[in-house]
Image (spheres, rainbow, N blue to C red):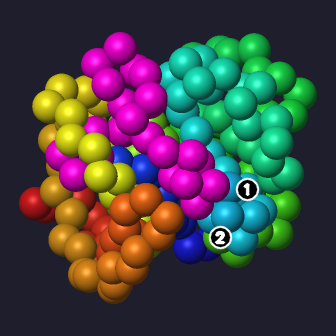
Amino acid sequence: MKVILDATVSPTGFISRENFEEDFLPDSGWDAFKESVARAGNFIIGRHTYEIIGPEHFDSIEATRIVVSSQNLDVRPTFTLAKSPEAALKLLEDKGFQEALVGGGSGLNSSFMRAGLVDEIIFYVVPYIIGKGTPVFTGEFEAELEFIENKPFAEGFISRYRVVAKESSGF
């Protein structure tokens, strides 16, 4: 299964402010995420994103929705709970999906990267710089990327990369 990590970020690599507000992110970033979800037919988010953004925010998106949390979490019936990134991918494989879309936050993004599960990364870079906030990744790991393309979108640019070294151990 192809795993695509999709994130809207500031040029400084933040996905939200320190207080988790995303007021600097334009609607076009949300629209781009919805287009990616429409192509994949699914998305995976972490517990923190589920709780902070709120599950109702995703109601307008027709897709298979998965929340990854190692903790027990009471999720809405429109979401499925998975205990790990691997379990989330297994759920999607069992439903016949060929592609999985990981939509954040930073803990989940990092978990997928550390496990060597990500094949491609798409950054929607928006023209707003913040000096402190939630980074797109957390923790210690490294990954080698191969540039695919940059292209403009409504309020910024899309930067795509292929993950070359999928096993982060050994870096």
The quadrant of the picture occupied by the C terminus is bottom left
The quadrant of the picture occupied by the N terminus is bottom right
Q: Measuring from the top left, give residue 100's x and y in whole percent.
A: 63, 62
Residue drawn at (21%, 41%), measured in percent from left and top?
129
Query: The residue tagged with tag 2: helix, strand or loop?
Result: strand
Q: Is residue 25 above or below residue 119?
A: above
Q: Measuring from the top left, give residue 26's x and y in whole percent.
A: 48, 45
Query: The residue tagged with tag 1: helix, strand or loop?
Result: strand
Please give the residue where the numbered disc 2 appears in the rendered image.
99
Q: Label the magenta part by its dominant secondary structure.
A: loop
- Magenta includes 20? yes
Q: Amino acid under label 2?
A: Glu
Q: Measuring from the top left, give residue 163's x and y in whole percent.
A: 32, 73
Q: Answer few, some or many: residues within 10 Å of disc 1's Cα (few below 14, many 20 plus, some between 14 and 19).
A: many
User: In the image shown, does 121 or 58 lie closer to the viewer?
Assistant: 58
Residues under numbered marks 1 and 2 in contact, where contact means CB atoms less than 8 Å apart: yes
Q: Quadrant of residue 93?
A: bottom right
Is 46 on the left or on the right of 17, as rendered?
right
Please give the residue where the numbered disc 1 appears in the rendered image.
42
- Magenta includes 138? no
Q: Is residue 166 above or below residue 76?
A: below
Residue drawn at (54%, 28%), measured in percent from left and top?
49
Q: Answer few, some or many: residues within 10 Å of disc 2's Cα (few below 14, many 20 plus, some between 14 and 19).
A: some
Magenta segment boundaries in residue numbering: 10-32
Marks 1 and 2, Cα distance to the nearest angstrom?
8 Å
Q: Quadrant of residue 69?
A: top right
Outermost right residue: 77
Q: Is residue 122 above or below residue 13?
A: below
Q: Where residue 122 is drawn, which disc sits there?
A: none
Q: Measuring from the top left, give residue 91's x and y in whole percent.
A: 74, 51
Q: Amino acid under label 1?
A: Asn
